[in-house]
Image: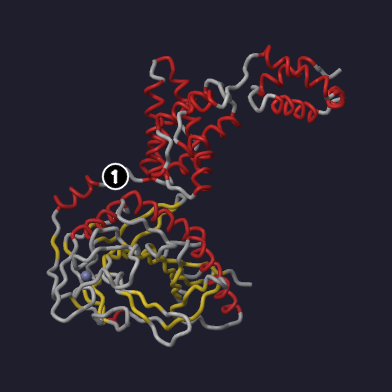
Amino acid sequence: MTKYIPTIGMEVHVELKTDSKMFCSCKNGMGMEKEPNVNICPVCTGQPGSLPVPNQRAIEFVQMAGLALNCEIKKKSKFDRKNYFYPDLPKGYQISQYDQPFCEKGSLRINGKVVGITRIHLEEDTGKLIHPKGVNHTLVDFNRAGVPLMELVTEPDIESAKEASAFCQKLQQICRYLKISDADMEKGMMRCEVNLSLHKEGEDKLSGIKVEVKNINSFKFVEKAIEYEIKRQEEALEKGEKIVQETRGFDSNRNVTVTQRTKESAHDYRYFPEPDIPPFNFDEKWIESLRNRLPELPEQKSMRFKEEYNLPQSDIDIIISQKDLADYFEEVVSEIKDKISCQECTADQEKAIKISANYIITELRKNLAETGQSVGEIKITAENFAELVGIIAEGRINSSTAQKVLSEMFKTGADPSQIVEEKNLAQMNDSDEIELVVEQIISANAKSVEDYRNGKDKALQFLVGQVMKETKGKANPAVAMDILKSKIKPE
Ligand SMILES: [Zn+2]
């Protein structure tokens, strides 16, 4: 079989989180509206004589995205009309950008590879058609019509389903860091289209016929759609069939792509400059002021975390995956630094920071996932979290107790010391006390003691387990193990 190599480019639409719509003062509800056609006006429903006024915030958002993605911010830019008929587009055209987008020539690094960004432009979203079941009519809801929509187009630099999904995830993360969109794919705030062609090994990477796949609404489906399309095209080419240049949709129930329509070219849309909105001129000062407003971005944060906290990269990746989780971690760290601030205590500080990272990554995230809460809803104050870390670091409770205490704190927001005291959870570190229990366990488990003496290490684990059970998890397991070993040395 001939080896085919995929060439993939992405087009990603992101709904921007502005207060109002792109060209009118209607509320930008971002899908939060409870009723259809409530956030509408003559402008976003395309009434004759209405005039669009561009939303400055939306333009800033696109330019900030451009800066975060290493784009050139164009000094001259304009809006254009893209003419086509569709019932969710009452004007008969969409205000978009054609030859002078706000941003061009950027890049985004994913897994050590650079994906080129051709352009980022701004346009208005369309309304939504609703097809009620069991009736032969269609309804239209214009709440979404005129919502600012950022469109980003990449170079065909992506070569696999995994890379494509990693690209989308990184882009989502950046949008969230910039606070320009929640970019939630399931809610339609971020929508991906894939352009994919196959070429034979050794041939030009653009020699294949390009197929576009739309309607992809999760990272998982980005991968599935690409995997399916690679396989479909490979099979067709092997049979000697020609690939048709077309637009396909992804059917997530069957994990297949299906033909929707043959692809239009740009000239079909009869683009022309939007006569109701004058062109823009941006100066260096404006662009600089936006650059100064950029927050610390994931890549910078990752490097700083590596340097400041010396955590493993995999831990850093998880913590910075959500900006507010990273912020929470740093608040805890700052509390720890307040508590442990002597010059000779750097080692203690470092240990406490590592414990914080571990408990945030495992236990805190587990509690969040189980309850479906967001980081913003966490009841545990950074101060209390740091206190818990201190209790763990001092060995006052063992790890299984710490998990219980953290869960309790997560539920009620209570103080960890209080929970430990009230529930009598403090770890037994006192060897004399533990020794008493060990003696009891040894006399009650003669068989296991015998097994251990005969070289079965597992029997020792069992005995430690019995000590833990007897002390309701409070014995320090390391101390219990040492005492057991000293008392029942293998012969
Ligand atoms: Zn409106």
* Quadrant placement of the N terminus: bottom right
- Residue at position x 57%, y 78% in the image: 237
- Going by the image, does 207 lie left or right of 201? left
Q: Residue furthest front?
A: 422
Front residue (pair 375, 151): 375
Q: Residues within 10 Å of mark 1 (few under 14, many from 20)?
A: some
Q: Position of residue 122 (x, y in %)?
A: 26, 65
Residue 248: x and y in percent read 46, 77
Horizontal and vertical percent for residue 60?
22, 56
Horizontal arrangement in the rendering, residue 189 relative to residue 123 (left or right): right
Q: Tag 1: residue type? A: Pro
Q: Position of residue 343 (x, y in %)?
A: 39, 15
Left/right of residue 446 with respect to residue 35 in the rendered view: right
Residue 282 vs 326, above or below: the answer is below
Q: In front here: 199 or 281?
A: 281
Which residue does the numbered mark 1 point to in the structure image?
Answer: 295
Taking the spot 38% from the left edge, 67% from the top edge, the residue there is 11
Q: Picture quarter containing residue 206?
A: bottom left
The residue shown at (50%, 80%) is: 243
Q: Is residue 265 above or below residue 227?
A: below
Q: Report if residue 194 is visible in the image.
A: yes
Asked which secondary structure carries label 1, the reply is: loop
Q: Residue furthest bottom?
A: 136
Residue at position x 45%, y 62% in the image: 158
Outermost residue, top side: 432
